[in-house]
Amino acid sequence: MFIIKCPYCGERDHSEFSYGGEAHIVRPKQPTELSDDQWAEYLFMRKNIKGLQYERWNHAHGCRQWFNVGRDTSNDKIHFVYKMGESPPK
Amino acid sequence: MSNNFRLDSGGEINRTERISFKFNGKTLFGYKGDTLASALLANGIHLVARSFKYHRPRGFLGSGSEEPNAIVQLHKDKAKTEPNIRATQIEIFQGLEARSQNCWPSVNFDISEINNFFSPILPAGFYYKTFMWPAKLWEKYEYFIRKSAGLGISPTKRDPDLYDHKYYHCEVLIIGSGPAGLTAAMIAAKSGKKVLLVDEKPEHGGSLVGANSEVTNIDNKRPKEWIQKTYSELVKIKNIKVLNRTSVAAYHNYNYLIMMQNLTDHLNENDKKNKIRQRLWKVRAKKVILATGSIERPMIFDCNDRPGIMLSSAVRKYLNHYGVKCGNSVVIFSNNDDAYETALSLHGKGIKIKAIIDIRQESQGDLVNKCISLGIKILWKHTVVKAEGHKKINAAIVMKLSNDNNSVVGNKIKITCDLLCVSGGYTPAVHLFTQSGGKLAFDEKKFYFYPYKTSLDQLSVGACAGIFNLKKIVHDTYIKVNTFLKTNIKNETVVADYKSGGFENIWLLPSNKISGKVKSFVDFQNDATANDIKLALREGFKSIEHVKRYTTTGMATDQGKIANMHALGIISDISKTKMGELGTTTFRPPFTPLTFGALVGRNVKQFFDITRETPMHYWHKDNGAKFEDVGQWKRAWYYPMNNENMYKAVQRESKAARECAGILDASTLGKIDIQGVDASEFLNRVYTNAWSKLGIGKCRYGLMLNEDGMVYDDGVTTRLGENHYIMTTTTGGAATVMSKLEDYLQTEWPELKVFLTSVTDHFATVSVCGPHSRKILEKVVKNINFEDQKFPHMSFNEGIIDNIKCRVMRISFTGELSYEINIQANYGKAVWEKCMEAGKEFNITPYGTEAMHLLRAEKGFVIVGQETDGTVTPGDLQMDWIVSKKKYDFIGKRSLYRSDTMKEGRKQMVGLLTKDPNEILEEGSQIVAEIKKSPPMVMLGHVTSSYYSPNLKKSIALAVIKNGKNLKGKKLYIPMKNKVIEVIVSDAVFWDKEGSRLNA
Ligand SMILES: [Zn+2]
């Protein structure tokens, strides 16, 4: 039921977006060099934070752009929104 | 005795409009403006329902949405009948028919009342306990439980009514139009903001409706005049919208609210016609003001559920608003001054008040003194210990309270009466506040939870914020709302004030009997008593959420609007835990039940979901195709001829496709146009095989994995130019593949210059296969040389059909010589018809998805989602050949080298042949190596696809089986309900292993 401010389109209803899980998990550049454990860390392990979480959203029924959101998972308050490739505001 | 309990004058009903209605088959009369409750009470009817568990007689307790007892079944009609409707909220109309629920044969004589006498065997947690008792006995309980569970009867026919949805945005939403809500609305409206004011009742005014006009006075006006004046001033202001009969069902985060507006339920049958019955509002508000008022509490004593025991505020409303007296001889039982306003109202109408029982030591309130001066008898520091009477109260048994309020002392006093008004104080209606995520705090002096913290742009005013004095409500609302809206509207309202005495609270009143002999109801609707709660605590339940579920307190359709506070209070007393520390149970939406009709709105029948049709859809329809739903698509499934059944049609179609020519509508396959200088590199990374060396004009089959190494999608991609590809995906995977690819492009590989466009709907795809397909294509498509050498398998050419460009791919999902024509969608049907015409001489046969599945199964081609289920790797499909060993990386590659994906003995795809070639396996059947007399048996895998092959003249199947790769030739078994089927593991390719037909 949130309102999300797409960095490209502005404020839109939650139903226009799809969730993409935790942000800033970079796909390893050289997967073959990794041990099973290291690969599993990338593939499966997520933080599941209670509090401020950085996560990915896609404006699926809008501009189709992916971007990052800083959301407090305990009350769904969105503190900031920033583009892919940018670092979260301090 | 007369059954007429209507006063000669007074009330807001329209006495010129008499309305007839039926209750339990009997014709009765009321007036326009009556609720079913007020009309029944005017007819002297209190007994309207039987309780859920014990089938005890029940009457009206309240006058609004909080009513727990008087829930009825509306309408006789099988389509329109509606269960569990609160009689206090139904406005009567000509022709209304209502019935009591949960009773048989009648509400007056109910056989199941016997439960009441056996109540010791129906203790708290009864249902849970039955699960722990010997399983064999369950069959006996089950009958009993099922028969007594549930209240009303569901409709059995399609709802004929119209429903609607509406989105609405406003700057200020005000919920509740009582004194606080109306005041807030006036301030907000005057500030020029876009305001929406809603109230669940037909009339505005909240607690002022039915107030005693001798006592309550605003701006030198009687309450009803003030409401009228305020309302008419409000609706003149353009920026405010006012809705009545509109109940807020849910208050979600970010001030998003769902409300249901009742538009026609109160109208006569004829006036309802062709109108929308209910409208669901989806509201986004910048700011929300909650003015939801409060709910009066009952008192908890023995047999406090008898008909004729009613909330004091409800009795007052029936009297002053509906002109109905709820009894002739009244006892009032109170712990506060508010009940004295009811006493004054009753006394003013000449109704005999036998006594006021007050648990307090004294009160110096103005209303109390007025009652004393009128000679009304007050028994201070007394309590009711029992209500006598069965189907209706006939006496209250009263005793003196001990000094510490823990017991009763002295002699029993019996006071005969036909009405007992109870007033246990008021509970702020914080349901919507908590739904929105707000945190409550408990006031240890005033004994209520009040709104404490919210993270939303939201404000609570009036009684829902714990303020009950009218003058204070108005004053406080001005201050708070002005701050909230940053306005400065002056409060010029003059409210007559009077002095009020204190409030004393006892959650569970003491009794002269041992607690086992007492039935003090806490949750009236679910028949949960104080003893049930005590038992739950004795049995070790501590958390309020557990006690709630174990005793079912607060779990009925009213969600414990009446019950919850006392349940908490009793737990707090017994467990010696502070109320504030106990917390409350969660109030969940909806606040009051709402209809499925309103929820679904216009999205019924063909509007239930989006359906997608291919450009050739109407050709299929005209030619008798049966359709299959594939996602949102309607796909031609098979084309029965001369009353063929599905099996026969599919056999015929499959045979024709191999022997002469078949034609399939493949337009639903996902198509993604890929362009950019890095397009080849991009495909290298998303598919398991290599793409850089694919020549322009060539096609290649690709398999796409998830990062976990499991097969995700497949399809043929064609290189149209140096930097231009067209990718096809499965029908169901089109949207998810597109978004996955977009995800990788935008987030992992932003350096790649690649642009994706979904073109699924832009092209129609006609697939023609079979030995004669080349001849047909030659007739239809110009500018292409179809000779095998010039146009080999897995290549592409651009052609022309009647001056329209088209793309032709020579690719095959059937194993036959096969071409796919892709043409701009609006020419799809014309091209299809051209192919049919050109193919006539070759007996071209349209085939549907079922024959397509059969043909590809003969060829051993997998269908993603049929042979795979998200746990299958390319190796499991015995498709290692498609996984590039040379490529440094692609999506999912690393996972193929995890210990689990590499281990021996994973489930692998194989073919199965039945011992009896005519035996067709059931898809999904389990496969075992060893048959035992009864389960469990070790299951090796299951059948994924199974058909009778008309071309091989035997039954064939695909299956995934543990270590299947190494089981070729082995005998396995499929245990069915009445037989065991013997199968032999075979190669998965049954037809044309060399592929000579493809390359013909
Ligand atoms: Zn956007």
Image (cartoon, rainbow, N blue to C red):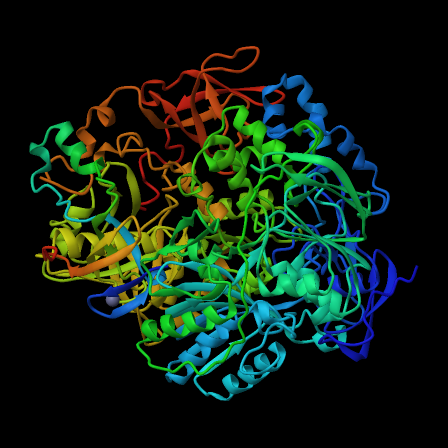
Along the line of sight, the residue nearer the viewer: B271 or A33: B271
In the rendering, at what x and y percent does residue B386 appear? 73, 40
Residue at the limit of the structure toward the right, as seen here:
B1
In the rendering, at what x and y percent does residue B291 appear? 47, 66
Quadrant for residue B774, please give it.
bottom left
In the rendering, at what x and y percent does residue B805 appear? 30, 71
Question: Relative to residue B359, is residue B343 depicted above or below?
Answer: below
State whether residue B804 appears in this view.
Answer: yes
Q: Residue at x 64, y 59 (%)?
A: B339
Q: Residue at x 93, y 59 (%)?
A: B1
Question: Relative to residue B56, is residue B432 depicted above or below?
Answer: below
Q: Say left or right for B202 vs B469.
A: right
Along the line of sight, the residue nearer the viewer: B700 or B293: B293
Quadrant for residue B86, please give it.
bottom right
Question: Relative to residue B394, is residue B782 depicted above or below?
Answer: below
State whether residue B725 appears in this view.
Answer: no
Q: Say left or right for B415 vs A80.
A: right
Along the line of sight, the residue nearer the viewer: B435 or A2: B435
Question: Relative to residue A42, is residue B163 depicted above or below?
Answer: below
